Image: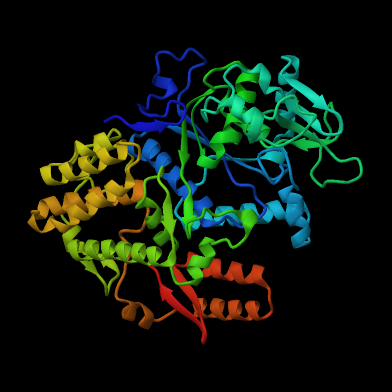
Amino acid sequence: MKLHLYNTLSRSKEEFIPLMEDPKYHWPKKDSVWLYSCGPTVYRDPHIWNMRAYICRDILRNTLEKIMWYPLKSVMNMTDVGHLTSDEDEGEDKMEKWAKREKMTVRQLADKYIASFKRYLQMLNIDEYQIICRATNHIKEQIAMIQQLEEKWYTYIIPGDGVYMDTGKIKDYGYLARLDIQWLKEWARIENENKKSKTDFGLRKFSPVDGHRQMERDSPRGKGFPGRHIECSAMSSRYLWDQFDLHTGGVDHISVHHVNEIAQSECALGTHPRVKYRLHNQFLNLGGKKQSKSEGGLVTVDALVEKGFHPLDFRYLCLTAHYRNFLDFNEELLETAQNSRNNLIKKMQKLFSFNQQKNQWNAVFLNDWTIQKIRGDVHAKVIIDFDYPMSYETFKNTLTSKYVGDALEEMMNALMDDLNTPQVLAILNQTLNSSDQVEEVEMKELFVALHRLEKNLLKIWLFDRIGSEKEKKSEEVPEEIRKLAEKRTQAKKDKDYALSDELRDKIIKKWFQIKDTKDGYEITKTS
């Protein structure tokens, strides 16, 4: 089965052929698929538009690593230094600005929101990248790349401003975004009379003479800080060499950030294309408008939990829209996603004899399953070892049921067609709705197949325990959870919001939800 992905470079779906399998690739041999993703600027809690992007990228990574069984090396940057409030080299530094607001150092601010970002990844069942690299730890690499560009005469200096990339020397500048360069020169970019062209961009900015920045470093050109784009080029080269397979980001990166990242990388390193496949996810719309941290009014995952939603309700909502399409968001749509996810879980329980009293899947249903492991190979009609690593193709060959095999193949065909998760969910629902015609032996295979689909791809807790809202609310809450909830209530009264968030996270990690009410709080079990 072949994976096809929409490549922004070609504006078309292409068969995914990793560099390690590409006969046209003549650089040093690779032994894995290499992926780089643009990470957050860590000055505030990430909002749900940010998190939708990382859910989309998680589906890509799951598909490559757990469905197609490619070895994967994944890298994400964390912007904890520099850049200005827009892509076009203007405005106030976000990190400095918000550090002043929160009365802490920039380093403390970055540490706080990196921890917050990782906590959100965990809440949404998004696997962490193998390498998460901070810009402040890679200043030397950034300076070295700028020196490479200087040696090749791609740069010039604006005194008192910074080192700039001379885009007029790049023949195909703007190809990724299909930019009309003449139009750009006349209209699109910031007015700066010292620039040679409006499309030129800062590689490194000089620190102001009359001010002090917390995050500035020495360089051959004096004290300064990175431009908006150089860190991605420098850090991806540091960990993924000069050419790699996949680069992901939001559609807002296409016209400026990734155009400039391509320009500086390919000029410095001499590789073309620097990245074989570029994937971009579309915006999440809130009231018909994309979210922006700088505009305020953010909706975070914590805010959804406060309103009684589970974080995975939002993950489910994201899966209902293709990653290249807009996803409209409001509370009614999230409630619909919550109900749909809960209904799927209830179908699972009904279909596979979940014992509510014992909180376990029916042992009688599973007791005649067998597995043999001989010399690392699996020989059995049905695989009961859910964690046994294997590709989709290998797993399908273990199935005896045509019904299960056909359903699984339909879902995989949808996934292979540019990660079409809405179609995967539609086929899943159709499969469960028609499962009353399935024989008992087929039910066992269906259970295993869906368990692997959940564990390796969807990760929305389809095998969670769920009852009616009345049952959940009447459930006994352990004293430990009650004490955490009481401490959280007191922390909120004391306006110690950091402690309040910490206590809420402890409650969530123990599989309970806490919802604030006018009378205090309400606790329900989530699994």
Question: With 287 as the anchor, is 414 left or right in this view?
Answer: left
Q: Looking at the picture, how far across and down is residue 298, in whole percent?
A: 57, 61
The image quadrant of residue 62 is top left
Determine the residue positioned at 71% across, 42% down: 83
User: Where 440 falls versus 200 (above or below)?
Assistant: below
In the rendered view, how is the structure colored?
A: rainbow
Q: Extreme bottom residue here?
A: 519
Q: Looking at the picture, how far across and down is residue 25, in whole percent?
A: 45, 15
Mark yes or no: residue 381 visible.
no
The image quadrant of residue 151 is top right
Question: With 179 as the anchor, is 339 left or right in this view?
Answer: left
Q: Looking at the picture, how far across and down is residue 248, in whole percent?
A: 50, 37
User: Where 282 falls versus 181 (above or below)?
Assistant: below
Mark yes or no: residue 128 visible.
yes
Q: Looking at the picture, how far across and down is residue 416, in whole percent?
A: 31, 36
Q: Quadrant of the N terminus?
A: top left
Determine the residue positioned at 34% across, 65% down: 336
User: Where 513 falls versus 54 (above or below)?
Assistant: below
Question: With 485 as the anchor, is 6 left or right in this view?
Answer: left
Q: Quadrant of the C terminus?
A: bottom left
